[in-house]
Image (cartoon, rainbow, N blue to C red):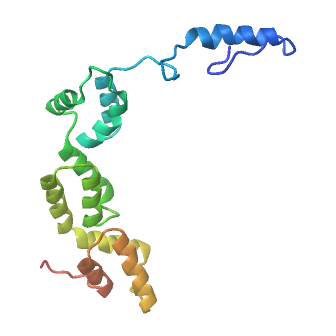
Amino acid sequence: MRKGRAPRRSDPLDPQSDDEAFDSSSAASEESDEAGRSRRPTRPLKMRAIDYLSRREYSRAELTRKLAPFVEPGDELDPLLDSLEREGLLSDARFAESLMNRRSSKLGASRIVGELRQHGLDDTLVQSVGAQLRDTERARAQAVWRKKFGQLPGSPAERVKQTRFLAMRGFSHSTISQVLKGDDDWSDE
């Protein structure tokens, strides 16, 4: 029998053989709940959380949203998340660092800070990551600009285009101005 498909009919002209195949394979093996969905064996909530966390870092709020549809009556999500934090499997600081490392080569501080806020992180953590990013923003903006354009704008229209490009990536106006002036020797302010 083929996996994942209905069994083949023994006689394509005999409608009775199709009904027998349906009765033996799908009706007997699947149960349904009251909403009409098929019931699959459910994994414990902790195993599901560990499975998610094994693929990538999640913030506490993000993992809560991911696990919410699987919470059964009688299960509580907050004690599970607290235990994952105690065991070191769930960490908002590690998530923020991961997102910062992943996105900082392409985006500016304000865009990354906005993404961290969307993920529901604490404001003090978001502000500390923002401060780290602002220290290197000029060099990162210069690298992004050099990769895309490589030369200073020759016309006002080209300057607007390059400014918009960097602004959409979350770099500050002062950083964009310095990049487009062509200053390679920036001193710290």
Q: Position of residue 98 (x, y in %)?
A: 26, 49
Residue at point 30% right, 87% down?
A: 181
Residue extending farthest to the right is 13
Q: Position of residue 103 (x, y in %)?
A: 32, 57
Residue extending farthest to the bottom is 155
Residue at point 29% right, 79% down?
A: 176
Q: Position of residue 154 (x, y in %)?
A: 43, 91
| Quarter occupied by residue 174 | bottom left
Residue at point 29% right, 56% down?
A: 115
> Could you tell me if residue 154 is visible in this image?
no
Q: Position of residue 112 (x, y in %)?
A: 28, 60
| Residue 84, above or below 164 | above
Looking at the picture, tell me which residue is in the foreground, 142 or 125. 125
| Quarter occupied by residue 28 | top right
Q: Is residue 155 left or right of residue 57?
A: right
| Quarter occupied by residue 113 | bottom left
Residue at point 63% right, 19% down?
A: 3
| Callout count | 0
| Residue 5, above or below 121 | above
Q: Is residue 172 left or right of residue 15?
A: left
Looking at the picture, tell me which residue is in the foreground, 7 or 51. 7
Looking at the picture, tell me which residue is in the foreground, 176 or 45. 45
| Residue 166, above or below 178 | above
> Quadrant of the image for the C terminus?
bottom left
> Could you tell me if residue 168 is visible in this image?
yes
> Quadrant of the image for the N terminus?
top right
